[in-house]
Amino acid sequence: MVAYDVIFCIKSDTESDENICTNGQWDCADFDCPGTCSVEGGSHIRTYDNQLYRFNGECSYVLSKVCRQSLFTVHGELRSCNQNDGETCLVEIVLVLHNTQTTQVLSIKPNGEVNDNSQIAELPYHTSNFTVFQPTTFYIIVQTTIGLQLTVQLVPIMQVYIHLDTSYMGRTCGLCGNYNNIQKDDYRTGNGMIARLPTTFANTWQSRKNCKPVPNLFIDPCTHSIQNEPFASFFCSKLQDQTEIFSACHSKVDVLNFYENCLFDACVCKNQQDCMCAALSSYVRACNEKGIHLDGWRTNLCDSYKNACPESMEYQYLIETCQPTCKSLSVPDPSCIVNFTAIDGCVCKAGTYMKNPDECVEIDACPCYNMGSPVNPGDKVNKNEVTCTCIKGRLICEAREKYRIDCKPPMTYFNCSVEPEGSIGVECLRSCQTLNVDCYSIECISGCVCPGDLLADGTGSCVPSNKCTCIYNDKIYQHLETATIGCSLCTCKNRKWDCEKGEMLGVCTVYGEGNYITFDSRQYRYSGQCEYTLVQVLCELSTYLQDHLSISKSITYCNIFAKQYFGNETPFRAGRHFTDHANH
């Protein structure tokens, strides 16, 4: 028997010998372990620091959150169930993700329904914050981008496993504790005090303030349910029996707590079979985490669940990757790169693909997906002026000859329909203008691309990366071509403008009836009834202002001009534009 105040963390079999028992005490190696918290059987809670307690809640509770930062909160709702005294069930898991702009709320119910901000989400479901998928009919997994993973068990009853990255050590609070490798302070209440009893502690973490506190009562259900006790004793004893399949894991995972939970649940539950099998599956999961896989454990114990698989599916004991889905044939499936503890359940038979949560089909019957919308097998859609047909879960698009001819050498035609899954087409074309811009491809788009390391120059051709074109006022300039930009003469040098620092002549423009563009590119319109000077050099401001105001007293905005003559010619020279806001 292992005391509750001992922390076990074994990274792998090769490191297991670092934890040594000497004179009745463990001498443990010091390294951080990813945190795992669980709610099993509707009342058994194991904290990140391996503290186990029982709590029959009647509310929604904060299971885990980051204490001093609004980053995430995991809520779990516990309720009395099956009209059975003393029996509580986990009836909903809610994950709330916070960021500076929005709050995203993901909820999961025992029937497998998933909602994102109250909208039903069809699995697999992907957002910028998380991926939700169902590797088997028994489990739903939520993988976030912030080091948090939820494994929600649906069959035979709802249970949840919360996995946290080590970066959250010492930063969490809630029913799962504070994840600091110290068990004695796990019962820290919402106001920071450490409670003596788990019920007192748990009541302070109610998510809804209209709930009543749960009284601190403990009754052994097996002593009060004489009719349930024989069933519980017979089947739960399989966990401890050295001749049973579970004994292969006894050296890695202490069975005592799982046996006691099994007895409690099998005695208190109305559906004894469900609760007993859930308790056994909890031990099997703990063994899977240690690398011990107990294939065949359901035989003569919990066969009914594996025999209840949909007709197009089959039961498997060991699933460690995503399922092949029809949707994954059209678009990459992010869930397939998620690592998770081995689980069991119903999956598609070999060579078939999941079309719906409980239906698998041959590849010929798979629909395609175009911008998220399904396309039935054989149906045609138009994508970028190209006709595409849904064949074996992929949209096969016609490579029209005119598109190939239109590609200006050395550009070549890239046909997405004949390229490997996940290929990137012209939607992320490497060009002089987008060389340093990140691109995210939602779907592959066929078109003309540059071969090798050449870049598109913006004119329908390709150039080496060291001779890139530049752009100014929506016009493309070739490498070493010049342009006047503002008051400078600039040369295009590999995507960047190199401008001379010397001064250039300014330009003032008069056109049409009273349209002006100043030397500083300011544009305005003025229709005067007099002769005005366009340009003046070193004018006496006070003299011209007074002279002009005496003529134009009714004008609020006045342009001050002077005139200078050279011989018989009257050219205009440098000048200024004035605005007068004085009261006239």
Image (cartoon, rainbow, N blue to C red):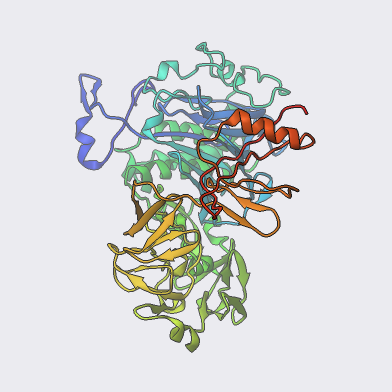
Q: Is residue 254 above or below residue 4?
A: below
Give the total of numbered labels: 0
x 23%, y 27%: residue: 29
Q: Quadrant of the N terminus?
A: top left
Residue at (70% x, 39% y) in the render: 82
Question: Can you name the residue that lies furthest to the front here?
Answer: 567
Residue 558 on image: x %, y %: 69, 38
Determine if residue 225 is in view: no
The x, y position of residue 330, in whole percent, is: 50, 69
Query: How far from the left and from the top, in percent, is residue 461?
Result: 38, 74
Q: Looking at the rendering, in which quadrant would you find the C terminus? A: top right
Q: Is residue 95 left or right of residue 280?
A: right
Quick one: 101 or 228, which is closer to the camera? 101
User: Residue 73 is drawn in which quadrant?
Assistant: top right
Q: Nearer the viewer, residue 578 or 42?
A: 578
How far from the left and from the top, in percent, is residue 43?
57, 31
Answer whether residue 119 is visible to the viewer in this image: yes
Looking at the image, the residue that sits furthest to the right is: 554
Taking the spot 52% from the left edge, 47% from the top edge, the residue there is: 573
Quadrant of res 509: bottom right
